[in-house]
Amino acid sequence: MTPTPAPASRGRVLGLLAGGALGDALGAPFEGQSAVAAAELTEHEKSGTRLTHTDDTALALVLARHLADRRDERGVDGDMLALELAQAWKAEPWRGYGSGAQHVLGLIEAGVPWSRAARATFGGQGSYGNGAAMRVAPVALVATSLHHAAELGRRSAEVTHAHEDGQLGAACLAGAAYLALHSTPGRRLDVARLLQDLGRVVRSRSWHQKFDRIGELIRHEVAPGHAARALGNDVSALGSVPLALLAFLGRCDEAAETIRYAVLAGGDTDTIASMAGALVGARNGAAAFPESWTSRLEATEQLGRLADQISTASRTRSSGEENHAGSDVVGTQRGAGSGGG
Ligand code: R7I
Ligand code: MG
Ligand code: MG
């Protein structure tokens, strides 16, 4: 059994949270644009305006707070989380929520159990959108193993995203955030190994095919537009989480460049850059981002308080803990083990 890793430093906890918020805010003006010109992004970076976040960060903050408040349980309470997500939407419905998400959260807010609400969209199959993946990274901060991270990711996802791919996207990003958080900055990241590890917790042929493609694209150092065409850059989980992984894995020690790459790939820019930003922030810490960005973040104070709360709790608890590894398998066995490609 893998021992529980040492708790992440406050800088890396904050890096994960702030990286997500930065990617979201820097990508937001371009969401839905098929391509983004470097000059447009530079202009937004230099504008000096406040970096306002969207639904991605609003809901990641809810999940982070949920985990921080329940630090003794180290888990997700589905009923409570569903309600907290719905309340955040109700308080700020203008943050750019997806149409399915608004419907599901509205039902939950009205008292419908999440298990029914999450199936009330898209012909009863539920959403395969990236809305569960975009908020999931904070689970890595309390997870005790890769499997635990993926399982917490899936459980945090199911309250709004009934579709398997919506849940696998969250499990995948949660697992990647866990591996990023416990990687050694400055030391070469073994991309093939990381993708293989993710393949063990995200057991689906279509996801394995994407992991194989990410490996190839990184070897060829492809440009953002090329990566978007090869992996997708849309609002589906399967069409966006892989691109966020690529943005991170291709330049995992360059915090700002990871976010820029994700935004320049176009499409669901706020979400893809947010997911990539959380990964690169988890590896390199908040100080790796330009001060000219972090000083303009809308949620700076909330993020700082959460980072304090989470890192203090994990330090206090760290010694002599058991490994809380969850289920070994996330998702169905459909195509599992094929290696895809
Ligand atoms: O998943 P979700 O919260 O979306 C997140 C996205 C991010 O880009 C945010 O920045 C925000 O802009 O929204 O919200 P959903 O509405 O569940 O899913 C997003 C979109 O994916 C939907 O509006 C649909 O267009 C599409 N979609 C589906 N289409 C057909 N069939 C999701 N699931 C389905 C489906 O099953
Ligand atoms: Mg958004
Ligand atoms: Mg988006």
Image (spheres, rainbow, N blue to C red):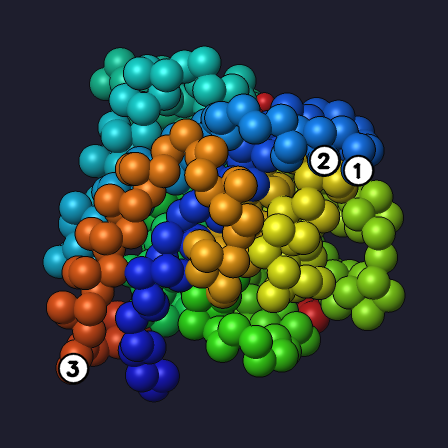
Mark 1: few/some/many CA within 10 Å (<14, 14-19, 20+): few
Question: How far apart are labels 1 and 3 at the CA level?
Answer: 49 Å
Instruction: Name the residue carrying label 3.
Output: 320
- Mark 2 is on which residue type? Thr
Could you say whether the residue bearing mark 2 is in a helix, strand or loop?
Answer: helix
Task: Examine the rendered structure and indicate whether residue 233 appears above or below residue 177.
Answer: above
Query: Where in the figure is residue 29, as x and y percent of width and height?
Result: 64, 24
Instruction: Name the residue carrying label 1.
Output: 38
Instruction: Name the residue carrying label 2.
Output: 42
Rendered-image quarter of ligand 1: top right
Query: Where in the figure is residue 282, as x and y percent of width and height?
Result: 46, 60
Circles 2 and 1 in contact, beta carbons < 8 Å: yes
- Residue drawn at x 84%, y 43% is 225
Foreground pick, 252 / 179: 252
Q: Earlier in the sequence, mark 1 or mark 3?
A: 1
- Mark 3 is on which residue type? Gly
- Residue drawn at x 80%, y 33% is 39
Tell me the mark number nearer the camera, choosing from 1 and 3.
Answer: 1
Q: Quadrant of residue 1?
A: bottom left
Question: How far apart are labels 3 and 2 at the CA level?
Answer: 48 Å
- Mark 1 is on which residue type? Ala
